[in-house]
Amino acid sequence: MTLALDTTPRVRRTRVLPGFRLTLGITLAWLSAIVLIPMIALVSRAAGVGFDGLIATATDPRVLASFRITFGASLIAAAINLVFGSLLAWALVRWRFPGRRLLDGFVDLPFALPTAVAGIALTTLWAKHGLLGSIAEAQGWRVAFAPPGIAIALVFIGLPFVVRTVQPVLEELEPELEEAAALLGASRLQTIGRVVLPELIPALLTGFTLAFARAVGEYGSVIFIAGNRPGQTEIVPLLIVTKLEQYDYAGAAALAVLMLAVSFVMLLAINLLQTWATRRHAR
Amino acid sequence: MRAERPSLVDPWPLRIIAGLLIFAFVALFLALPLWTLFAQAFAKGTEAYLRAIDEPAAWSAIKLTLTVAAIAVPLNVVFGLAASWAIAKFQFRGKQLLTTLIDLPFSISPVISGLVFVLLFGLQGWLGPWLRAHDIQVIFALPGIVLATVLVTFPFVARELIPVMEAQGTQEEEAARLLGASGWQTFRRVTLPNVKWGLLYGVLLCNARAMGEFGAVSVVSGHVRGRTNTMPLHVEILYNEYNLTAAFAVASLLALLALATLAAKAALEWRGRTEIAS
Amino acid sequence: MARPDGDRIVTIEALGLEKRFGAFAALRGVDLKVEPGELLALLGPSGSGKTTLLRTIAGLERADCGQVLYEGIDADTISLRDRRVGFVFQHYALFRHMTIADNIAFGLKVRPRRGRPPRAEIKARVEKLLELVQLQGLGGRFPAQLSGGQRQRVALARALAIEPRVLLLDEPFGALDARVRKELRRWLRRLHEEIHVTTIFVTHDQDEAFELADRVVVMNDGKIEQIGSPAEIYDQPATEFVYEFLGGANRLPCRVEAGVALIAGTRLATDLPRDFSGEAIAFVRPHEIGVTRPNGHLDDLAHVRSILPIGPDARLDLEHQSGHIEALVPREALDAAGIGVGSRCAVRIARARVFRASS
């Protein structure tokens, strides 16, 4: 991977400001040391297993199962966040109620709370004898140490993304659009569905993508609640750690690269969808 | 203003249904987990809580966490300032690519962030044999933990600063230069005061993540109790040993850090708003 | 579009409307009766309450006090859908994710199934409306692909699609450049003659109000200053504010004795009560002032500062002891009297409107 950076500023005018070469130098050096070189190490190590090795890794039943559970639970969690996150954003922007500012601040809790802490709290809450787990158990639902537990952890860590991407768009939305719709005879639900929602689609997709991407890579909050049974509740990051603990560096690297590739393809697809959705809006 | 527009008011049935859904969601995913955390930490009383924290392994974990943050955060501040200056104040080819690469650590799994350093510096890693010959330990030691933490928190400061600096434009700096200020003076007296709240905000988020990082650190640390255990790792060990009170006690410290970060963030946002308003 | 049925054109009344936004009083007791089919302008400076009045009539604001009546019925009891108000927002508020045709059809498509016209009819009506606003063939475009003037007309077509009983326009030409604005103004006047729907529009531009409207409502500080035809407003401004707002008039301090004012040496009867004596303000338009050769009196004597020819007339800048006076006189008269820059002249006031000096 080579960086073709042309270090001459395009606009001469900005030349009056100093430090371009110095700061760009620091940036590139640090970026290379911390991000690029390690990534190259990862890719080259994965390449070491060869194409056949990669295919063998990818088609291993245990790996396939872990991909299924990781991406499946992430999609479900991101979808739940899409619905509830936009509701929450709507309430925070449009409604006035006591404790609104407090709630607004707490939305970021999953960003700030260490994942391991979230993990043990969620596990205790949803375990068989936990506050919510005992209720679920009485209904015959197994949450902790089962796939639903993974989804719950992933909902938690992805919660702020949709809220924080939708919120500013809602705040900036011209109120006249809704007034126009109301005067044209639309009911409130029609206005929300046909006028507001289409305006939010790009932000919703962005929030969904971010929540999804975060969920796919998540480790700390999931491993406590997942149960980690191979083939059933074992997520890809955990499988990578397992391989690493068995000193299977090449296998871990191959798995990591596969995971990055699948994420990349999915993010690309969502990005394309978003471009398609925003293109009509281009002013 | 918006709240006063009658045609924008949601009808009551809609509010009640949506409100109940939101309440349930917030209770399940925010309030109850937080409550569980503190309830468990104090389940056996304050004394047990204090005993769980005042214990050599806990202290060494706290010390290590503070040390790691004290190294990783300043490094990322210097990098963030440099990167945002170059990106926000100058036009150059490849800028978009550079911004994307800076954001990259956000979109990779923390486990991979740890893995890459094992692949570089581990026993079977690229530099493993050489490091071993020179008796330098990176993996399963402080340097590895710091590296993994730096990678995970890499984008935080830069990401907060770039938009603030871009919004500021270059006119003030240009004016300062034309008035005879040196480059360093311009930066210190014109740029820095303009971006100080954004910078502080970035530092807060960076620090919270640095102290709380689990996955990446877990991969490189080796879990040597009393030596390479950070607070989150210590929580994990206690939890896996079924020492729940102690696990939640240490976890509650991290939770307090998170709450303090949220409070500071809210204060900063409030401050930013009033400064703009005045 | 067919001429609307008689029952669609309604009388709208505002009775004692009051509206506050926090500490700011936007409407302070407004009474207004809008006649069926008329084109009414709400004219005033920004903050005068004209937009709030329009939005209150539409039902977009709820008055703190007072009532809006549609054909004698309290509008609060009529839902927004049933009011059938066509509203054109200043920035159009077009739905940018919908095509022009979908924008126009919106009001028809959201009707409950029973009242909704069949698909083919909606399509035909959209086509007709596109024709009416001269945007044939652009139905498939998105708002972002149109010019400001075109968007404005789309907004109008969208408002007309629901066959409104009243059409309300908030600063309809405010966001357009001067040339497009003039064109659209003429076009809107013609359109109104064609469809004859009761129309109220808000503007801060008096030319716009006078050129378009049947009647003009001048507003200031949350109250109505004057209602009348453009000619009435121009010829007989009712208040000091209207004079000031219309602009161009000289504002001369003067003294009134028993109802008669002495303005720059001219004695004129006023509308003030016979028994009123005291300080007053006279408003005199430039063309209501004549100049003659100095006649030996001191109190009508003025000094000619400058002369600016405007066609057959000339604009004079006069320095009088009561202040600066602007006069518009035929150039012939100047030549006949031998008045030039730097010379002295006597001022004759032909007409003036006198108001008691406030406090």
Image (cartoon, coloured by chain):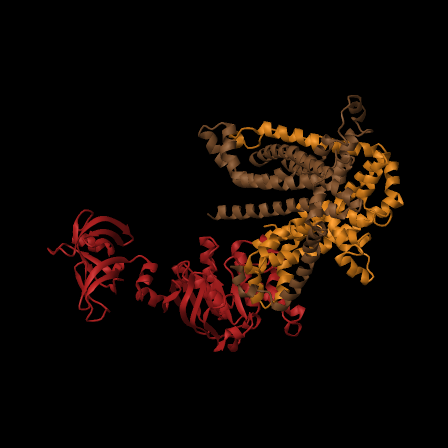
Residue drawn at (22%, 52%) of the image = C318
Q: Nearer the viewer, residue B20 or C238?
A: B20
Depth order, front residue of B57/B260? B57
Residue B223, percent across and down?
A: 78, 36
Furthest-left residue in this view: C296
Which residue is at a point 56% across and 35% down the rendered structure image?
A: B89
Residue A273 seen from this side: no
Which image quarter holds the N terminus of chain C?
Answer: bottom right
Q: Is residue A97 left or right of residue C237?
A: right
Q: Is residue C336 above or below residue B175?
A: below
Q: Is residue B260 left or right of residue C46?
A: right
Left or right of residue A59, residue B254 in this image: left
The chain coloured orange in the image: A
Quadrant in the picture for residue B32: bottom right
State the hue of chain C.
Answer: red
- Specify the quadrant of the image occupied by residue A53: top right
Q: Give how far across and how far down residue B54 sits, in percent.
A: 70, 41
Can you tell which chain is drawn brown? B
Quarter of the view holding residue B214:
top right
Q: Position of residue B194 (x, y in %)?
A: 51, 38
